[in-house]
């Protein structure tokens, strides 16, 4: 082997490609995209190292042998290139062609066995070079086919993407890889076409540098890196390669005098040391900047977590407050506004917004978009977010009809009027329920990326479901109120005593419940559900015979047993509506005659075993029962009623609730 300074460019190119491939593989071991990129780099490495060994060979046999080895790598470059182009551009319909392309590369290997593929070698200023025969032309024709298809995939991916950031990254990579294909100039000397030097390493060095930059700038291959630090490392790698080449060129005579033919181990060793050092430096930087990186993109995790929190909000107002505050804070947007559909106005109305810059025009709350508004029409048609800059870009590059241009221009004008750079739709069950208008990021140089849009869309589905839940809840409330009114009317028609009784018990229960507001927060719609439970607590009396319910004489023990069945009867009556009413209301109906000491009915629960609704209704019900005249006794004065409540505090009644009744009495509220 005669290693000279002319062999270093290919060697350094192969070494740089190897380190780049290993770096990508280490970050994406389970990714199909990362693996295909690594195999592409490995093929280039075999090609470049094969060049070095072939050129440095002293005999024609060795030159041909290493030539056949380098063509093993060359044969698979188009297939890995094609596979990478399909994965990167996410062209699902062309994935089926990948196995066929690999079979083509395997077929190309059979050309290496033909005697007319490589027919010899000749001397050049950079060493021995191969001479190819007639079958090599057929080989090249087949070899170019998947390469051109891969370039077509990059072009197709660039033209079909909908997002500006994704369009930029695909355009950049498309241009870079198209330039890297110029490395085919290395085939020219094999046809004895006179060249100054095989310059294929230059496009390949461009391939290394541009891919490294694309990883930094556009986060391709799903690798996130810190821009400034890794850019410096990339620059150092290129500078190191140039330094080794120049230093070796000038030091070669002195190194030959010292080490003889072994002089080549000096630049090789330095190259490996620099490569390993840079690889380790990248790892150290990534580890040291991990915390900074996490902070920079922390809002993405928080957005996903926020979607879960939306499912637990109690009302529409709380939902919108969370949505606007968190979006504006985490993504650092200068404006967020939410427009929800209202049946009463038959349009999308701006319910809440937040502006974080003083110079932004204030959008009036209550502004409405009708169902035939261009923004609404376009979203219903495409079911995708509207991006103002994308629409303007579409107008610039697409030859559209005048009518379509006017329509898109109207949309962009209306979005600017609403202060929206992006409008995110929130669908649920194919119904558009909400529009979220997003402004620009507070940092002018920072754009909203495709990843941001994907997260917004993911969040929008959760928001849509939450809004739909509130809409269904409103319908449920209307049905419950209607059912409740029917039941209360039936009760009051049966027993004159109950006329007004349920309303008064509900009123007392509300007054008590407001003092237990912190405890009621643990129950969904606690205060309103307590009111409904109080209004329905005697619904079971519908099933009691009139001869007992309206009897003027004192009741017998057997008749009292029938009266005591009314909580169970009430539960049976409302059971078909249990899904609407909920367990809390049903518990208030069933247990409102349980005593605090466990002597009540129907299940003899005691103390905190009794539902809070039932304990409150027990006191409110007893208070109202004592204040009314009954056929078998006269009403009691309020002072006597309070004394009775105090007397049975801790036995019949919850002491804390009796204390609240005392406060209400002393304050004149009852």
Image (cartoon, rainbow, N blue to C red):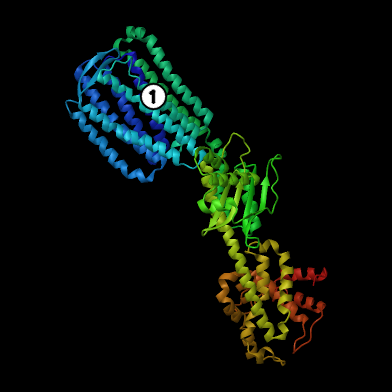
In the drawing, does residue 553 fall left or right of residue 128?
right
Crowding near the residue tagged with mark 1, few <14, some 14–19, many ≥20 C-alpha atoms within 10 Å: many
Which residue is disc 1 drawn over? 203
Q: Outermost residue, front direction? A: 402
Q: Is residue 168 above or below residue 306?
A: above
Report which quarter residue 22 is drawn in: top left
* Residue drawn 68% across the image and 90% down it: 555
* Residue drawn 40% across the image and 27% down it: 179
500 or 670: nearer the viewer? 500
Q: Could you tell me if residue 556 is visible in this image?
A: no
Q: Could you tell me if residue 380 is visible in this image?
A: yes
Estimate the x, y position of residue 233 in percent, counting from the top left. Answer: 48, 25
Quarter the C terminus occupies: bottom right
Estimate the x, y position of residue 271 in percent, counting from the top left. Answer: 39, 20
Report which quarter residue 208 is drawn in: top left
* Residue drawn 67% across the image and 86% down it: 494
Q: Is residue 35 above or below residue 513?
A: above
Quarter the N terminus occupies: top left
453 or 594: nearer the viewer? 453
Estimate the x, y position of residue 160 in percent, counting from the top left. Answer: 44, 42
Q: Is residue 409 above or below residue 186?
A: below
Estimate the x, y position of residue 225 in percent, counting from the top left. Answer: 50, 33
Local secondary structure at mark 1 = helix
In the drawing, does residue 51 fall left or right of residue 444?
left
In the drawing, does residue 198 fall left or right of residue 517?
left
In the drawing, does residue 277 fall left or right of residue 618?
left
């Amino acid at each position: 082997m005669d290693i000279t300074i002319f062999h270093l460019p290919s060697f350094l190119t192969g070494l740089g490609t190897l380190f780049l491939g290993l770096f990508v593989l280490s970050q994406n071991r389970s990714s199909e995209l990362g693996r295909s990129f690594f195999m592409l780099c490995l093929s280039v490495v075999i090609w470049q190292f094969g060049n070095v060994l072939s050129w440095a060979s002293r005999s024609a046999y060795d030159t041909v042998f290493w030539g056949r080895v380098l063509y093993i790598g060359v044969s698979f470059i188009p297939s890995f290139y094609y596979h990478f182009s399909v994965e990167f551009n996410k062209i699902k319909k062309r994935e089926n062609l990948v196995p066929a392309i690999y079979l083509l590369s395997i077929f190309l290997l059979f050309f290496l066995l033909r005697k007319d593929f490589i027919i010899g070698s000749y001397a050049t200023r950079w060493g021995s070079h191969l001479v190819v025969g007639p079958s090599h032309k057929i080989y090249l024709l087949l070899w170019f086919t998947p390469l051109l298809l891969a370039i077509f995939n990059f072009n197709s991916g660039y033209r079909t993407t909908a997002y500006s950031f994704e369009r930029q990254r695909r355009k950049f990579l498309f241009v870079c890889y198209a330039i890297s294909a110029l490395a085919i100039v290395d085939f020219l000397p094999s046809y004895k076409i006179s060249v100054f030097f095989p310059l294929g390493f230059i496009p390949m060095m461009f391939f290394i540098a541009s891919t490294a930059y694309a990883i930094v700038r556009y986060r391709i291959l799903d690798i996130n890196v810190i821009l400034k630090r890794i850019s410096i490392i990339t620059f150092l790698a290129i500078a190191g390669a140039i330094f080794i080449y120049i230093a070796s060129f000038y030091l070669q005579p002195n190194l030959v005098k010292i080490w003889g033919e072994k002089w080549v181990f000096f630049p090789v060793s330095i190259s490996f040391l620099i490569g390993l050092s840079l690889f380790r430096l990248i790892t150290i930087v990534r580890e040291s900047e991990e915390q900074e990186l996490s902070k920079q993109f922390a809002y993405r995790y928080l957005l996903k977590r926020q979607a879960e929190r939306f499912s637990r909000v109690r009302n529409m107002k709380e939902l919108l407050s969370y949505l606007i505050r968190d979006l504006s804070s985490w993504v650092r947007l200068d404006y967020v506004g939410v427009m929800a559909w209202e049946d009463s106005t038959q349009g999308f109305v701006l319910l809440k917004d937040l502006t974080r810059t003083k110079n932004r025009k204030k959008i009036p709350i209550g502004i409405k978009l009708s169902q035939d508004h261009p923004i609404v029409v376009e979203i219903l048609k495409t079911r995708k977010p509207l991006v103002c800059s994308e629409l303007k870009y579409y107008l610039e590059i697409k030859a559209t009809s005048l009518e379509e241009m006017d329509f898109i221009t109207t949309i962009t004008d209306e979005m600017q009027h609403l202060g929206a750079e992006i409008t995110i739709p929130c669908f649920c069950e194919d119904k558009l329920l909400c529009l979220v208008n997003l402004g620009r990021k507070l940092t002018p140089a920072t754009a909203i990326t495709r990843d941001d849009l994907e997260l917004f869309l993911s969040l929008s589905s959760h928001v849509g479901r939450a809004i739909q839940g509130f809409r269904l809840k409103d319908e449920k409330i209307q049905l419950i109120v209607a059912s409740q009114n029917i039941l209360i009317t039936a009760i009051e028609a049966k027993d004159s005593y109950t006329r007004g009784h349920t309303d008064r018990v509900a009123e007392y229960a509300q007054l008590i419940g407001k003092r237990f507001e912190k405890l009621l927060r643990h129950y969904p719609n606690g205060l309103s559900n307590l009111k409904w439970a109080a209004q329905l607590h005697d619904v079971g009396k519908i099933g009691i015979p009139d001869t007992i319910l309206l009897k003027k004489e004192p009741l017998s023990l057997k008749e009292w047993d029938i009266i005591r069945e009314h909580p169970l009867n009430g539960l049976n009556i409302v059971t078909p509506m249990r899904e609407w009413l909920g367990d809390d209301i049903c518990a208030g109906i069933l247990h409102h005659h349980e005593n605090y000491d466990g002597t009540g009915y129907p299940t003899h629960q005691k103390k905190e075993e009794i539902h809070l609704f039932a304990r409150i209704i027990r006191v409110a019900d007893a208070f109202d029962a004592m204040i009314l005249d009954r056929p078998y006794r006269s009403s009691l004065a309020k002072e006597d009623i309070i004394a009775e409540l105090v007397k049975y505090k801790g036995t019949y009644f919850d002491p804390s609730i009796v204390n609240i009744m005392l406060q209400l009495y002393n304050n004149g509220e009852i």
